[in-house]
Amino acid sequence: MKIKIKNKEFNLRVTEIVLSAFFVIFVACYFGEAMSFWLNFTFLLNGIVILFSLFRAIDRRAYSFELVHLIFYSIFFWIAPVIQRNYHYIAWGVRISDTECVWVNGILLLWLVLFQLGQKIAGTKSFRQIQKPVGIPKPFVIGTAGITVVLTLIMFFRQGLRGLIADGGNLFGSNVSATVGSLFFHCVTAFITFTAIYSIRFWKKERENNRNWFWLMFLCLFCLVLTSFPTAISRYAAGSIYLCVAINLFPVAKKKPLFFWIFSCGMLLMFPVMDLYRYVSIGEVGMDSILGQILSLNRYFATGNYDAYSMLAICFRYITSYGYRFGKQLLGAILFFVPRALWPGKAISSGAEIAHSIGLTFDNISAPLPMEAFIDFGIAGIVVFAFGIGYLLRRVDNSYWQNEEEHRNSYIDILYCYAVPFFLFLCRGSLLSTWGYLVANMAVVLAMSLTCVFLPKIKWIRKK
């Protein structure tokens, strides 16, 4: 849409108009006497900064780490906490004062400004090592598809169709340790997921020469759906896997601002709906429950699912009582693969650490990235983490979007579309668990990429 003001022409995008209207309506509905003047002011200031940052991110790229970071920020650090203050919601039984919330808003504004500064400093820099084109050999596609089918059949005969749909694929029972079982499960899931991605990209390249590759791709996708059924796996996993498939399968996914609307609506609607399936199977959730969940979204935001803001506030009290962790939480996350049997003093997740400090028995609670930085190093951690993460993610975004070709198939091309939606889960935390999941996927893609590089160098394969 184009408008003229004093003979000057301005472009107004529909997305900007809709977001601005939503911003105004939300402020009119939820800002007021429920919060003090300074709390209203700091929330309003943060909301304005988030809104204009979203405008730039949506205009810059169809999807990116920057965009997902801002979507997370707007929902978990702006929409949800404002609604919670209006409903007088008390996260985990800990009442947060307006003064503490003002300090939290200051921390969040500092994080956002420094994150954007890191993005700006990174400019157009990228990581060339992960941009190198990689071919996809036919034996690789056939071999990985065959392994995927075998893994799926093992899961099917072990669990049955109902078990796969209700609980997701699993190769082991309770005969292995939780750590080994979890790590192996994520590697197997990653292998099946990226086999499907490779098959999609191979089919799109070869479909003019041989249309039969479509059926191999269809088989890989069928195995993926069967072993990672949307209602049988966690919400972050379902979003990451199926958005990754959609982006690779449909070229329209790269048109702005389609991803923003799908991802945002998914977070606002599907995230609450999928919560209904966390403890029951698909057949036990009726349409009335789904509609009821959608129609009561404002109250759903006032639940423990959106405790990220409150956890950052509670972190202030933790530090007052116990002091900073001085890198223990970060070190535990980086060395997640070291068993506790070898490292008895290994840190537990930051969310669990704070949960135990306030006497909670349930400790599977969030620990957003700003909290991870603050609990280890205080304000200095906020400054370094925000700038460093912003700088790093802009370079990764550049590595994917610069000189992009449909059939390049580099390491970043394969991993990026999964990692971008997954980043929201990492933003929510805790870092100890989320980083381990992401590294498992990174390692699997690295192994598959190296296989694609070295497989054609084997003489008998090259002769074929």
Image (cartoon, grey):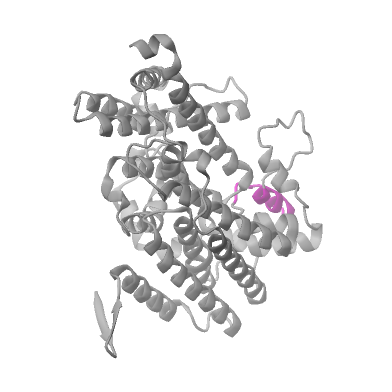
Task: Judge whether residue 91 is colored magenta.
Answer: no
Snapshot quadrant of residue 255: bottom left
- Does residue 107 appear left or right of residue 264 in this picture? right
- Compared to residue 316, the image places residue 202 above or below, namely above
Q: Quadrant of the N terminus?
A: bottom left
Q: Residue furthest top?
A: 460
Number of numbered discs: 0
Is residue 206 visible in this depiction of the protein?
yes
- Compared to residue 185, the image places residue 245 above or below, namely below
Q: Nearer the viewer, residue 320 or 209?
A: 209
Q: Residue furthest bottom?
A: 6
- Compared to residue 337, the image places residue 356 above or below, namely below
User: Percent position (x, y) of residue 225?
Assistant: 34, 33
Is residue 293 visible in this depiction of the protein?
no
User: Percent position (x, y) of residue 245?
Assistant: 34, 39
User: Percent position (x, y) of residue 429?
Assistant: 58, 50
- Compared to residue 26, the image places residue 70 above or below, namely above
Range shown magenta: 350-365
Q: Nearer the viewer, residue 387 or 329?
A: 387
The residue at the point 25 percent across, 81 percent down is: 3
Task: Judge whether residue 353 is colored magenta.
Answer: yes
The residue at the point 23 percent across, 28 percent down is: 214
- Does residue 196 appear left or right of residue 205 in this picture? right
The residue at the point 32 percent across, 71 percent down is: 18
Q: Quadrant of the C terminus?
A: top left
